[in-house]
Image (tube, rainbow, N blue to C red):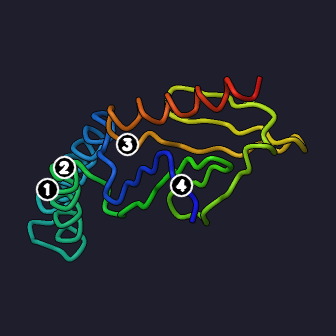
Amino acid sequence: MKETFVELKFNGRRKLSSSRRKSYYVGGIIFLIISLYGVIESNELSVLSIAFIIGAVLYFIYGLIEKNLIKEKNFISFQPDEIEYKNSFRKPQNIKINNLLDLRIETAKVEFVLNNQHIRTYDFSVFEEPDIDRIYKELEKIKASLG
């Protein structure tokens, strides 16, 4: 069995950014204004107005929850001879360390440049800050060993 240096997993819902939350609030307000305008103009509660009111309430609730509705499963595993990772909604990928030409480490993702010039990307923005620091350390070790 292979000895794993570091294995990090994320199985949860990604938080919404503040701008995304605000856009849901604004969308809810717009739906509410449209529905109220329809009720005032027609002097009755139509099916379309009810649909817009329901949409407004759902937008407000989604903004209050502050998380995506879809659950993500991400992981990265550093082993002595390979790196295994999985971005959300994709198949797990294995990269042999001796097949790596270079690593491009960015703020919340890494690009693996392979010997055949293919580039594979792993996004680790879903992890918490201590886990991101561990990922950075492991990637820097691997990058230094590449020469």
- Label 4, label 3: how many angstroms apart (C-alpha)? 23 Å
Q: On the rendered structure, is 4 left or right of 132?
A: right
> Which numbered disc flags the more N-terminal residue, 4 or 3?
4
Q: Which residue is mark 4?
A: 3
Q: On the rendered structure, is 20 left or right of 58?
A: right
Q: On the rendered structure, is 95 left or right of 88?
A: right
Q: Which mark is residue 103?
A: none
Q: Which residue is mark 2?
A: 33
The quadrant where residue 111 appears: top right
Residue 30 horizontal/vertical position (percent): 25, 47
Q: Are marks 4 and 1 in contact (CB under 8 Å)?
A: no
| Residue found 67% across the figure and 57% down from its top | 94
> Which numbered disc flags the more N-terminal residue, 4 or 1?
4
| Residue found 14% across the figure and 56% down from its top | 36
Graded by Cα atoms within 10 Å as few (under 14), some (14 to 19) or many (20 or more), the crowding at tag 1 reads some
Q: Which residue is mark 1?
A: 36
Residue 88 horizontal/vertical position (percent): 50, 58
Look at discs 4 and 3 and give the one toward the viewer. 4
Depth check: give the residue in front, 74 or 26: 74
Secondary structure beneath label 3: loop
Q: Are marks 2 and 1 in contact (CB under 8 Å)?
A: yes
> Which numbered disc flags the more N-terminal residue, 2 or 4?
4
Check the image and name the residue furthest to the bottom. Answer: 47
The amino acid type, in three-letter code, at marker 2 is Ile
The amino acid type, in three-letter code, at marker 3 is Phe
Q: Are marks 2 and 4 in contact (CB under 8 Å)?
A: no
The answer to whether residue 18 is above or below residue 93 is above
Secondary structure beneath label 4: loop
Image mark count: 4
The amino acid type, in three-letter code, at marker 1 is Leu
Secondary structure beneath label 2: helix
